Amino acid sequence: MKSSEIRLVLVAAVVFIIVLGLVLEIADAAYNPESKLRRTRTKTTSTPRTITTTSSSSTTTSTTSTSTGYSDTFPAVNPAILGTCPSEVHDRYYVIGPDGRKYRTWHPVTVPIDPANPSRGTCTFAHEHGDNPRQGSFNDLPAFGYAAKVAGMVEEIAAHAGFKVFYKPRTGDGLGNNAEWRIVVHQGTAGARRLVQTFHSIQIDIVDAAGRRTKVNLMAPTGDLNPKCGPRVGDRIIPDEECVLRGLYYEVWYFSVRVGSGNIHGARFFAAPGIAVYNPMTYMKVGDLTQVYPICGVVEGLPFGDRRSFFLGNLRAVEHPDFGWGNPGPSTFWTDAYGNERTSGCDATTCIRQTVPAGYYAWFDDDSTFDWPWIDLPVGAPGGN
């Protein structure tokens, strides 16, 4: 055989081996798609996490990936609340809490996809957190759910869309109106858990006219559940079926905030704000505390969380923000997650460090209602607002 013929045979053999390898790889991928995935994605290991949302008569289940970067204080969120944003964009918004753990925090509704590359444009989340907490005298971002973690109630942290911020500048003549304050609460109106969960996190920051600073954070009770159309006794009022049929959609939770042992209602700091929502997403049925029902379906004939709906849980106010100070002790002290004073065995993982001006005895009872501007939510929020 001539040398040229030998070379042709060798080339043909090499081509045959390459083609055979490709055929076998394609066949293997078709038979076992995960084999190709293992070869191409080796940076992270993911475990599916199931998040369930209950609406009128069905249960919708969404699945997201929980990477090794997530934790109970920084959990993966329901994809339904991400809107047009990738999860990695939402994950940019976090702070390190007093306990050294990573917590999600406030973010705008519309954000850049890549701040370093404006050409990539913006995306819009399907949830919002109210006022920008960085205003006036406040330049920090709150750690959403820190008190819940100290209390061992991390399920609240997972309900990320429920964290809301209210800010009021220093205006007016009275003690309360002349104080600048910020309130961060957990209050969602999409899920059924609010029917049975009394304690929710609340953080109150105040700078009064004299420049004295108050900073308290705890899990505070919101009282007994009361349908809005029933007896109104200042507890956790949630619209029921009768309310919806009568066009009464108003929802309000009255927080009872007592921090430390002092001279104002037995506390160093006392507050009793009512957090109101004028367009809650769902209503309850008396006698059934296991599920809630979309108001938009009854009133507007729209699907739950539809962006065209009025009922997106984003029109809110703080009613009667009564505050009182009566601190006979030092300005900083430790409490448990519920505001009860602790004198020993505390650190930032087991207790919360509170700040209340020392020797300050004051009270104001503000009977006005602070109405907040409409907080624009451009898209629906089936994950809960």
Image (cartoon, rainbow, N blue to C red):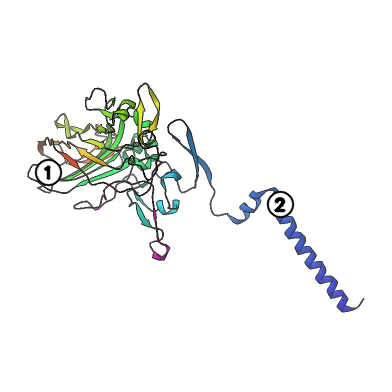
| SS class, disc 1 | loop
**How many marks do you count on the picture?**
2
Q: Amino acid at mark 2?
A: Asp
| SS class, disc 2 | helix
Q: Residue at x 31, y 31 (%)?
A: 199
Of mark 2 and mark 1, the one earlier in the sequence is 2
Q: Which residue is mark 1?
A: 177
Q: Amino acid at mark 1?
A: Asn
**As drawn, 50 above or below 68:** above
Residue 62 at x, y percent in the picture:
49, 41
Q: Which residue is mark 2?
A: 28
Residue 79 numbered tag: none
**116 drawn magenta:** yes
In the picture, the quarter occupied by the N terminus is: bottom right
Residue 64 at x, y percent in the picture:
49, 44
Magenta residues?
113-141
